[in-house]
Amino acid sequence: MTEETKTIREMCEAFEVTPRTLRFYEAKELLFPIREGQKRLFTKRDAARLKLILRGKRFGFSLEQIRQLLDMYKRGPQQLNQMSKTYEIALDRLSDMERQRDELTEAIDELKEQIEWGEKTIAELQNQPRDGNS
């Protein structure tokens, strides 16, 4: 191993992923490690791509969206086009995440109301005189 490449174990440790995850991204053609027999060596480019893949997953992008973003950077010096497309995709994802957050906030508020109602109902039932016929 050189400073220019990392083994699968080193990549797993550096990015807190499993070998299976790395193999999955390789099979999906998102990572392109150097193959030496059964050994995989990951370049700095692979490490940068994995960082972007994991960030994209954390933000909720699909693998296809991540692939499209990564593929833009293979096309050459079209930085304005790349940044514009990345910006559009990020805005769309942000909008989706905010909508999901709002829906979740609404559901949480409704559940809290139901819990309050349940607490009051239980308290009222506990404070009612009990019928001796039970």
Image: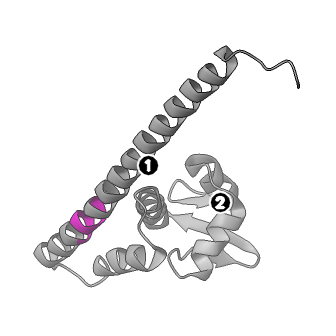
Label 1: how many Cα within 10 Å (few below 14, some 14–19, many 20+): few
Q: Is residue 41 magenta?
A: no
The crowding category of the residue bearing disc 2, from other C-alpha atoms within 10 Å (few below 14, some 14 to 19, many at least 20), is some
Q: Residue at x 65, y 78 (%)?
A: 35
Do residues under tags 1 and 2 come within 8 Å of each other at their CB atoms? no
Q: Position of residue 11 (x, y in %)?
A: 60, 55
- Measuring from the top left, give residue 25's x and y in whole percent: 58, 73
Q: What residue does disc 2 label?
A: 7
Count of all numbered marks drawn on residues in the image: 2
Label 2 SS: strand
Q: Residue at x 54, y 25 (%)?
A: 120
The residue at the far bottom in this view is 75
- The quadrant the C terminus occupies is top right
Q: Which residue is rendered at x = 20% and y = 75% of the image?
A: 85
Residue 10, compared with residue 72, is above or below; it is above
Earlier sequence position, callout 1 versus callout 2: 2
Mark sitting on residue 13:
none
For image coordinates 52% across by 53% down, the residue present is: 3
Q: Main secondary structure of the magenta part?
A: helix
- The disc labelled 1 sits on which kind of residue? Ala
- Left of 12 or right of it: where is 71? left
Image coordinates of residue 5 in percent, x first then y, are 55, 61
Q: Which residues are magenta?
A: 89-94
Secondary structure category for the residue under label 1:
helix
Quadrant of the snapshot with the N terminus: bottom right
Give the number of the disc on residue 107.
1
The Cα–Cα distance between marks 1 and 2, rounded to whole angstroms, is 45 Å
Q: Is residue 47 above or below residue 10?
A: below
